[in-house]
Image (tube, coloured by chain):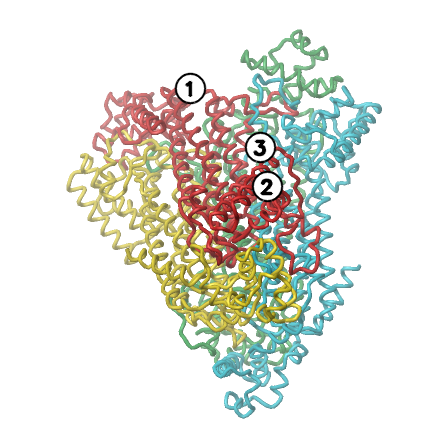
Chain colours: A yellow, B red, C green, D cyan
Amino acid sequence: MKAWGGRFKGETNPLMERYSASIDFDWALFEYDIEGSKAHAEMLAHIGILDEKERDGIIRALDEIKMEIREGRFEFSASMEDIHMHVEARLIEKTGEAGKKLHTGRSRNDQVSLDMRLFLKHELRLSEMAVEGLLVVLLEKGSKEKGIFMPGYTHMQKAQVVPFSHYLLAYYYMFQRDRERLKGVIRAIDVLPLGSGALAGSTIPLDREFVRQRLGFSRVSENSMDAVADRDFVLDAVFANGMVMTHLSRLSEDLIIFSTEEFGFVSLPDELCTGSSLMPHKKNPDALELTRGKTSRVIGDLMSLFALLKGLPMTYNRDLQEDKEPLFHAVATVKDALAIMTLCIQGMEINGRRMEEAAIKSFMAAVEMAEYLTLKGVPFREAHTITGRMVRACEEKGVPLASIGIEEMKTYSGAFEDDIYDHIEPRRILSNRRTTGAASFAEVEKELDAETAYLHH
Amino acid sequence: MKAWGGRFKGETNPLMERYSASIDFDWALFEYDIEGSKAHAEMLAHIGILDEKERDGIIRALDEIKMEIREGRFEFSASMEDIHMHVEARLIEKTGEAGKKLHTGRSRNDQVSLDMRLFLKHELRLSEMAVEGLLVVLLEKGSKEKGIFMPGYTHMQKAQVVPFSHYLLAYYYMFQRDRERLKGVIRAIDVLPLGSGALAGSTIPLDREFVRQRLGFSRVSENSMDAVADRDFVLDAVFANGMVMTHLSRLSEDLIIFSTEEFGFVSLPDELCTGSSLMPHKKNPDALELTRGKTSRVIGDLMSLFALLKGLPMTYNRDLQEDKEPLFHAVATVKDALAIMTLCIQGMEINGRRMEEAAIKSFMAAVEMAEYLTLKGVPFREAHTITGRMVRACEEKGVPLASIGIEEMKTYSGAFEDDIYDHIEPRRILSNRRTTGAASFAEVEKELDAETAYLHH
Amino acid sequence: MKAWGGRFKGETNPLMERYSASIDFDWALFEYDIEGSKAHAEMLAHIGILDEKERDGIIRALDEIKMEIREGRFEFSASMEDIHMHVEARLIEKTGEAGKKLHTGRSRNDQVSLDMRLFLKHELRLSEMAVEGLLVVLLEKGSKEKGIFMPGYTHMQKAQVVPFSHYLLAYYYMFQRDRERLKGVIRAIDVLPLGSGALAGSTIPLDREFVRQRLGFSRVSENSMDAVADRDFVLDAVFANGMVMTHLSRLSEDLIIFSTEEFGFVSLPDELCTGSSLMPHKKNPDALELTRGKTSRVIGDLMSLFALLKGLPMTYNRDLQEDKEPLFHAVATVKDALAIMTLCIQGMEINGRRMEEAAIKSFMAAVEMAEYLTLKGVPFREAHTITGRMVRACEEKGVPLASIGIEEMKTYSGAFEDDIYDHIEPRRILSNRRTTGAASFAEVEKELDAETAYLHH
Amino acid sequence: MKAWGGRFKGETNPLMERYSASIDFDWALFEYDIEGSKAHAEMLAHIGILDEKERDGIIRALDEIKMEIREGRFEFSASMEDIHMHVEARLIEKTGEAGKKLHTGRSRNDQVSLDMRLFLKHELRLSEMAVEGLLVVLLEKGSKEKGIFMPGYTHMQKAQVVPFSHYLLAYYYMFQRDRERLKGVIRAIDVLPLGSGALAGSTIPLDREFVRQRLGFSRVSENSMDAVADRDFVLDAVFANGMVMTHLSRLSEDLIIFSTEEFGFVSLPDELCTGSSLMPHKKNPDALELTRGKTSRVIGDLMSLFALLKGLPMTYNRDLQEDKEPLFHAVATVKDALAIMTLCIQGMEINGRRMEEAAIKSFMAAVEMAEYLTLKGVPFREAHTITGRMVRACEEKGVPLASIGIEEMKTYSGAFEDDIYDHIEPRRILSNRRTTGAASFAEVEKELDAETAYLHH
């Protein structure tokens, strides 16, 4: 069964059936398609196009079809193009004349937009919850390991000592932004397109407000042409997912490096690692590498969608069918990747000793040494130069900054006094930092408290 | 002058100076860099690092530097890397010791994030205003031409008759979403990063709240590592711009097609068209083609940014320098493209006669014919098939639907009566449409009123 | 069964099994995986690792497995990760100890590269043949319709009259470049990676030359680390496919526009069009719109792959697993899209009358008018200006260029003589064009002959 | 001066002049534009359109214009759109009537294609030479350090011991493929488009063969419409550059990691590193990070170009103007990035001691241990499991594999004998590897010899 055909002479080419069929992927929308059809049927009864018996028969049949699909008893066929036609054809089999009335005032153009919006409202809520799950374990891990410090890096070079929890919180705030972004997208999606027909609305007095309330949308679309041409909400969703993935990919990169033998900062959970078919000693951070790789794919999804829409004339064009696979891929990937990272953060072992050794064995305190001089009145630029020379001297001798005696120190700057040694000790640095949001134990404590409260409110 | 050097033995390679210098493009941030430095200087005075005289000298010198750059009297050099170093070096020339204190507690890592946030808050507000400008002319044009109808298209094939203003309003609502998206991005950007230092904050008691108020930010960043590693706001901005461009590109595509000789629906303003160096008769829609092309570039900008960030370890890495050119390009392009489209909508002539002829000479009324049958009780699927057969018959004979006599009509369906001819007349169709947001004169009138009020509130 | 495990304490997490399993898509490589394993087994026998009985048993078992998979009798499971492990596990079930020897000197790292190279050599050859098929129908259509002329467009505006066949040949040459590009990629792929092991080769004296000959490769990879890290051939393949799609998309765009009612140049075959579920009169160019849309997806595939590889450290990283779905998608899509376009070109009806009317009703001859003047000694820039003024005058009056009498013509330029009318007649123009590759009937004839010979050599 | 105007009533809008002007970037084509114009002038004289005096005057004037631009004495203006118009306008200033004849039979459509092809032939040859330069230093470094071994990595985990030179050669072969790819692109570019006019060739008997020889092209384009619509060569070039950048980015990633304090394998040249404005001790691998970042930009360039072309109708559309900036960016970036990497490889210090220690302190010999067992007849899968258990036992005790006494070894497998200790010693492993292209000192020696010969032939 085709949704059309009266005007056509020839048959559809079998290759064309395969090329154009979307049922392989859009079957995933079946619950939403049926939900939408039920609401449409109720509205048609409400305005007198269906009588009560027809309405009830249609709703019962739609519920049966939902169960048939859920239970794998439903037969799909490329010749019936898409999920909408599959459901409608089966409905007509079950209800006859009544079923033939269901498509009144409706087009696949507004129907598919409805299905996708219902789908995305549901799926993005799941993603948002998965982000929340990750936020929780980041806080938990941060609380548990809050006494540990490590080198903070810029350019992959040791930069300044930071609490390990401060590092974790940096990611916490990234994912919090993701959560807000997802919420914003859910709000943007929350518009009922049904009732826009193919592009022009209808001469039949469809009650869109009735359908809106029935399906729980906040608003009704304002322009029928825009409603069927619009895929902004798809791009918004994939962009938001792409941002989540990008953050997961950055965290993955860090953990892959931190779990090398050379760094040795963390040990990833065995349950997320795999071995080698050839090398018996390998334990590879596959889960994280896959996340990094899957991020590329979601970026590619977004590229596909932009290239798809750019330059498309009004209103609906069949190109739009190709929006589904990138969207479905992005939505499914992000949920899995979040769950994997949640397991990873929960399960990874922190090697505090290695982290702290790496922090101690470094010239990172040069910053605080310069700040010490600054607080004693040396202009910062001079303090920076003085300390730079001291680092160079120590590096050449292979000794730490603290090994320079106070007399020698004074040859670099008269401002040095005995309290300098205390001032550049890592834990002391972590107590001395004063600024809001700084890498200090006190700020971390404050943030952990505030965010724990935020997540539980 | 380099910002560093104490620890280095060799000179920087000249090729490396060119390769790594950002001054060619980041000079554009100078106003924001200076604004940020002034606020920082005031804060340093507030906490006692600078005395009042130093502060006032610095502020005066920074204002002078701003004028030097504005007036083209400032000398740039690749060996000084970036705008931050240029300004600071000149400041030290002017103020000596005082100037050397300015970088206290500050790193280029938090400084550049500040500059970009100030820049973007300003620029995106301009973009938002440019969107508003386009919204206004879309409404004006829609109001002016509200009596004209045209074919609405799906798949580039005539689909259903629509008011021309309804078509324009479809774009109106797209750009309204863009406006909301831009506002959301401006809110996300509105966070002060300064005070995060290189990645760890400072042992110097910088007063970030003071700086926040001075610079007019809503919030202070919560985590120093996140603050310097974060480029979410850049991607948010380029994505929002990419969406604007995509909508402009779709509208351009339409107008390019509508202004072909074959369609002849609109005539574009001469001031936006160009001719041919070889073909004397050509009048080409260059402005719109360029918009379509420039859209590709902004999409490429977004892809660059995703590829840049994906898999970057914490925190700041020099890769991030490459965020600027795509961002600057996207921001500049979208403002121009909006201005061009505003001129285009304002200046284009509408050929209502051609539009209406194209609408009349078509089988588009088949939809309303089927709806007529539906309202008379024929199930929609049957009505669709009946009308499809009638279209095919008419097409073979080369005659319009309305040319079928009532007796012949009844052979297709007994439900046809004499009022069918009236029912499928274009203007009647445009009056008969009932649904919210439909392509009807009444809905268009309502929308024009509502949106005019909205834009002027 | 995992390919590893000796060193692991914990179990793999079930989510991780799903997240990391590639069997859902890499099963498609089974024929190549088995072909490679057979060659490897023969080589192991050749160097004495397997005895003849073991070798024969393995080969027999592998052939059985191939049939089991082909016939759908093979059981797949996410817990066994990938196609390599599935085949090997089943082999060990069938052959015991002998099967356990097969993986000698081999890693999944070199094995998967082998499988993909075998797969791509086969698939790209099919793509190349599909391109040839399209080249043939383009020539056939061009030959059949070689007397028809049409407007050639730049900027979607009528530019100069051209033979319709010349237009088709433009696409012919694009696809000919695609064919050459595909051939180049096939050559680049034609390198045996097997024998590179995980990344380092082997202390077992594997005979790579033996395997190369057995599998029909031209060369053996030269460096074991490069061999397992390299995905250049995947990007080469997807890029070449992306170019084919881009050309198909441009041709689709043309045909979508040419088949609008407004242009009316071609009528697409019913077998590639679909109708509307709501609008009984619609005949939509879905096949071509899908091609345009699917092009976006292949571009996205390439983006995914670049983002995947960019910044990946040596050598094999699990990210690389994500190369398969984009590759498989690109390869499958391009074959279908070529077949669809071949059907489309073959089946479409050309409306020569509409094309020629559109060419005649235009100012396109202004170019030849200017060239006429140039041949009479008027500098081209002046000739261009003169003709431009004539076009403007005619346009204002709504008359064609040829309607200007000779006396009036002479007021524009004294160089006009009576033969001008003949010179600007469309068919005469098409005879008068002189340059190699020009839009003239003679050049088209020459090209059709040359290319027909080329395709049949 | 505009190249057109006769038919236009209004003036071009100043914003439109800025929006559409390409002179800001296409001035870079001036040498090629002038070279092309000189050849065109000679041809016009050859066929009698210009007399000898006119020809000589034009050529002299064009040479003068070239010097004016080179020496910065030429005035550019957005109102004259592009480089073609600038040169032609100045030419007419200098030569009067003669100059007005130059554009005979030529359009900016074929002219710009010519300029870009000439430009790219030159630029890609420079890129190819830069690749050669990098190949040379990779070989030199490989020869110099050929006695050093290091851990080879998969998944960033130590995998198997390899000669450091083998690692360098892996990149050598990547860049060698790039060189071949660049050569292929240069061949594809080597086609003369001039003589195709706007899209249709000319009624003036232009001698394209004459121009081809004069400009040194191998072939003449075969179809005038294809010639002006085609940007395949631009995508080919940017793709090839994108591949080079991707390889440079991977190498950068490695070296960034290898130069961390934690790895300590290499020390990058000071001349390519920079410091921190805040942290006196930092030495950052900026050059390599920038290369990684710039790679993202070139990927974005390619995406821009695909999005640009996808769905563009025949033939020339103004969108195509936007091809230049991505192309110019890609071409300039790749040359610099290659030069930077060449300096980096040349100048970096290799810390052989750290590399070898890292290789020794590992379980990497487990592979050769398993191969030992295989050579003694244990099926590989069993050998893998046995060795995996030994690794796990050693890891728990924190001892190396070689610390297990022979008696204890025999409890794992009876096949172990005293020669096992020798067999798993790193340098012995590197001598024992047998396969072509393996990570062995002998293979490296062979490859170094062969490639040195190849580069000098």
The spot of residue A372 in percent (x, y) is: 53, 60
Residue A239 in sight from this viewpoint: yes
Q: Nearer the viewer, residue A419 or B210?
A: A419
Q: Which residue is mark 1?
A: B352
Q: Which mark is residue B260?
A: none
In the image, what residue occupies the spot 72% across and 10% down? C414
In the image, what residue occupies the spot 66% across and 15% down? C386
User: The disc labelled 1 sits on which kind of residue?
Assistant: Gly
In the image, what residue occupies the spot 66% across and 50% down? B1
Q: Which residue is mark 3?
A: D317
| Vertical position of residue C24 compared to residue C453: above or below | below
**Where on the picture, by quarter, is residue A170?**
bottom left
Horizontal placement of A272 versus B37: left or right?
left
Circle nearer the viewer, 2 or 3: 2
The spot of residue A135 in percent (x, y) is: 37, 59
User: The disc labelled 2 sits on which kind of residue?
Assistant: Trp
Q: Image quadrant for the C terminus of chain D?
A: bottom right
How far apart in space, not on screen, are marks 3 and 1 (Cα)?
Answer: 27 Å
Q: In the orientation shown, which residue stands out farthest toward the bottom?
A: D407
Do marks 2 and 3 both belong to one polypeptide chain? no
Q: Nearer the viewer, residue D27 or B100?
A: B100
Label 2 SS: helix
Q: Chain of mark 2?
A: B
User: The disc labelled 3 sits on which kind of residue?
Assistant: Asn
